[in-house]
Image (cartoon, rainbow, N blue to C red):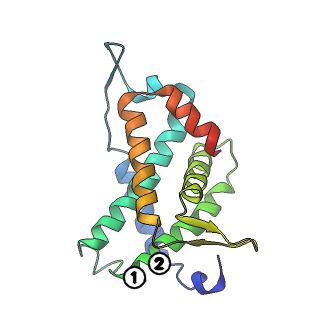
Amino acid sequence: LRPEAQKDLDFDSFFTHILAHEITHGLGPHGTKVDGKESTPRQDLKDTYSTIEEAKADITGLWALGYMMEQGQLKGSLGQGAVAERKLYNTFLASGFRTLHFGLTDAHARGMAIQLNYLLDQGGFVSNGDGTFSVDFLKIKQAVIALDRELLIIEATGDYARAKDLSLIHI
């Protein structure tokens, strides 16, 4: 991150996102129907399931916190408005690089690679060309919504091919 964004790194944003990540593991379908047969996302998505599930929990947690901020529901903890949003999204970006340290054999890191690359492709995150990255606050919310929708649809439909494509393109 650029020095001016580093001042936004915030333990409360980091910790609260981890809590939101864990809570949002429970969101999404627990049962699917593929080709008329009852199944589960875990069975349908096979070797991609853990990666997709970790990415879904991260991005859904980020979306949920942003939404709750907009609704004024986090005034007493994370705050609201531009300062709180800067802290949340800059902390998430920095945390993404921390997660990548686990290596791409780890489902959390593979999920984060998908997220970072997708958000870069959508313009929500920006590579500054000098080894630093930043958040484009005009694009980040829509990019998060788009990725969250994609991951939730993949799990809801049990679309293994779509999960595999997302993994191949963004890892």
Few, some or many residues within 10 Å of mark 2 (<14, 14–19, 20+) = many
Quadrant location of residue 150? top left
Query: From the viewer's perspective, is residue 45 above or below residue 28?
Result: above
Q: Residue at x 41, y 64 (%)?
A: 141
Q: Closer to the camera, 9 or 3?
A: 3
Between the C-alphas of marks 2 and 1, the distance is: 9 Å
Are circles 2 and 1 on residues that touch, CB within 8 Å?
no
Q: Residue at x 49, y 46 (%)?
A: 54
The quarter of the picture where the C terminus appears is top right
- Find numbered disc 1 in the image and state the secondary structure of the residue it sits on: helix
What percent of the width, then of the height, locates residue 136?
52, 71
Q: Nearer the viewer, mark 2 or mark 1?
A: 1
Q: Residue at x 40, y 67 (%)?
A: 16
Whether residue 21 is visible, yes or no, is no
124 lies left or right of 74: right
Query: From the viewer's perspective, is residue 155 above or below residue 68?
Result: above
Q: Which residue is mark 1?
A: 82
Q: Which residue is mark 2?
A: 87
Q: Specify which label sits upstream in the sequence, 2 or 1.
A: 1
